[in-house]
Image (spheres, helix red, strand yellow):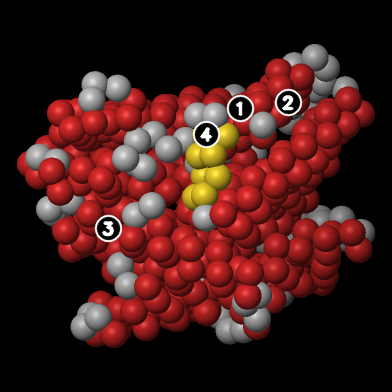
């Protein structure tokens, strides 16, 4: 139902660009997807899985569905004020707003499709759909840099998604003799039953092509080149959706292949080592970029690559402890990064610059914004008592317990240096004498933007039993199949 709501909402956005109409329609659509999505998540977690027509959800689907809905609600509510200010400052014509919300809802619909289908082929269609929708959002400002970023994004991601298509076709060739020449041959509910009978050569090539293909969309190094440009040039709410949701949806597609690969004759090590290799490389290379970065939105983009690397390490390790930590980290990173892109987008709009050296004295001018930035700094760097510390600790513990002390030490070292880099950049912006003629004053309602970070803080102090059970179900799906 929620996919249909998103599609109807997208079409409805084209009727009018009036502020009142867009606020009403977006609010109604958000209520409907929240209610229908929440009901689906509840049914899935109660029964272990839930099916409706051609759609199917398990615990892993429910985790991603939760992330999509929460971030969509948060980002669209923020967009309502943010985009109005963009129009008021003559950065965009009012008529462009209906197209902005149209593509946002198309984007949401494609992501909902990705996590609601049991078919690896349709997952590919959904991921390709996200590329088409987000390309126009990345280049939404229609200036030279935005258009360049959009072209870079669509070319690199299209090449990547073509690799994923080839991998999917190879899997179909391996599965068709056992499951028939139909969509069933790509159904990840049926594939585990014939996993050991699949041609290992075809599956091996399929996994390699798919890891590289979807890895480009996740932003794994060295396929990450599109990500900092796209995140920095897109409207800030779009950057939040890209980082907090899109990357996770592409990772979700990889996890479906990862689960299948573990069950084939290739074994868990083959797929896990590929994932860990991408993860470590992504984490290691981002250290230098984060330390030397001067553009605040690009800094957050490189941080996203870092955290996708952390997730790849956790999932690739393949122990219950590490996968539990990675599943929690997926949720917590989404909440933290969405909040940071939103609060930084608000700040960039006020100061008129993305350059870190030109932002000074934020705490003196906008104290509420400063408070949220401090929380965001602690959350994104995995500082205790935030939940990201708990999730990263689970992954690190898994590395040491499985005989990877050098990898564990290197990961701790990289995370420490990244923390120092973020601390340096944020302290520059928060304190010191304000540069430029900033208008002081802000509403206490700004503190509402901190809600996701407060959730991350709470989950660092206490994990509700219901969430723990849900994460254990996710671990079972990833490590044990469906």
Percent position of residue 100, x then y: 68, 27
Identify the residue position indicated by label 3 in the image.
275
What's the CA distance linking mark 2 and mark 3?
37 Å
**Is mark 4 in CB contact (under 8 Å) with mark 1?**
no
Location of residue 92 (image quadrant): top right
Label 1 or label 2, whichever comes before in sequence order: 2
Instruction: Identify which residue is drawn at 50% across, 29% down.
Output: 54
**Is mark 2 in CB contact (under 8 Å) with mark 3?**
no
Identify the residue position indicated by label 2 in the image.
9
Location of residue 385 (image quadrant): bottom right
User: Which numbered tag is attached to residue 106?
Assistant: 1
SS for tag 1?
Answer: helix
Which mark's residue is nearer the viewer, 4 or 1?
4
User: Quick one: label 1, few (<14), some, or many (20+) residues within 10 Å?
Assistant: many
Label 4 or label 2, whichever comes before in sequence order: 2
Identify the residue position indicated by label 4 in the image.
55
Label 3 or label 1, whichever comes before in sequence order: 1
Label 2 or label 3, whichever comes before in sequence order: 2
């Amino acid at each position: 139902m929620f996919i249909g709501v998103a599609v109807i909402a997208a079409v409805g956005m084209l009727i009018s660009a009036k502020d009142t109409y867009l606020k009403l329609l977006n609010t109604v659509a958000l209520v409907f997807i929240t209610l229908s999505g929440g009901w689906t998540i509840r049914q899935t977690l109660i029964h272990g899985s839930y099916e409706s027509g051609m759609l199917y959800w398990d615990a892993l689907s429910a985790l991603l569905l939760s992330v999509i809905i929460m971030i969509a609600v948060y980002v669209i509510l923020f967009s309502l004020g943010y985009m109005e200010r963009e129009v008021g400052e003559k950065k965009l014509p009012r008529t462009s707003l209906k197209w902005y919300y149209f593509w946002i809802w198309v984007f949401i619909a494609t992501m909902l499709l990705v996590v609601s289908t049991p078919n690896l082929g349709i997952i590919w269609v959904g991921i390709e759909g996200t590329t088409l929708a987000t390309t126009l959002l990345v280049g939404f400002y229609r200036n030279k840099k935005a258009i360049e970023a959009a072209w870079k994004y669509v070319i690199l991601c299209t090449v990547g998604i073509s690799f994923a298509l080839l991998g999917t076709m190879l899997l179909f060739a391996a599965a068709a003799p056992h499951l028939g020449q139909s969509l069933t041959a790509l159904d990840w509910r049926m594939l585990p039953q014939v996993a050991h009978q699949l041609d290992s050569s075809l599956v091996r090539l399929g996994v390699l092509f798919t890891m590289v293909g979807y890895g480009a969309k996740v932003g794994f190094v060295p396929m990450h080149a599109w990500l900092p440009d796209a995140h920095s040039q897109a409207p800030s709410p779009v950057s939040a959706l890209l980082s907090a949701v899109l990357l996770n949806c592409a990772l979700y597609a990889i996890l479906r292949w990862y689960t299948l690969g573990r069950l084939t004759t290739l074994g868990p090590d083959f797929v896990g080592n590929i994932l860990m290799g991408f993860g470590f490389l992504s984490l290691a290379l981002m250290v230098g970029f984060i330390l030397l970065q001067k553009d605040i939105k690009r800094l957050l983009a490189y941080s996203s690559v870092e955290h996708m690397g952390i997730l790849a390490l956790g999932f690739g390790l393949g122990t219950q402890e590490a996968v539990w930590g990675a599943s929690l980290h997926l949720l917590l990173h989404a909440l933290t990064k969405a909040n940071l892109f939103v609060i930084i987008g608000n700040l960039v709009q006020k100061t008129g610059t993305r350059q870190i050296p030109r932002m000074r004295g934020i705490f003196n001018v906008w104290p509420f914004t400063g408070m949220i930035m401090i929380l965001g700094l602690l959350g994104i760097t995995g500082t205790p008592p935030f939940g990201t510390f708990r999730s990263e600790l689970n992954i690190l513990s898994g590395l040491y317990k499985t005989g990877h002390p050098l990898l564990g030490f290197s990961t701790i070292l990289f995370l420490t240096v990244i923390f120092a880099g973020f601390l340096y950049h944020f302290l520059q912006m928060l304190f010191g004498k304000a540069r430029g003629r900033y208008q002081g004053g802000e509403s206490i309602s700004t503190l509402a933007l901190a809600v996701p970070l407060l959730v991350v803080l709470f989950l660092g102090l206490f994990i509700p039993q219901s969430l723990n059970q849900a994460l254990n179900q996710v671990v079972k799906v990833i490590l044990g199949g469906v």
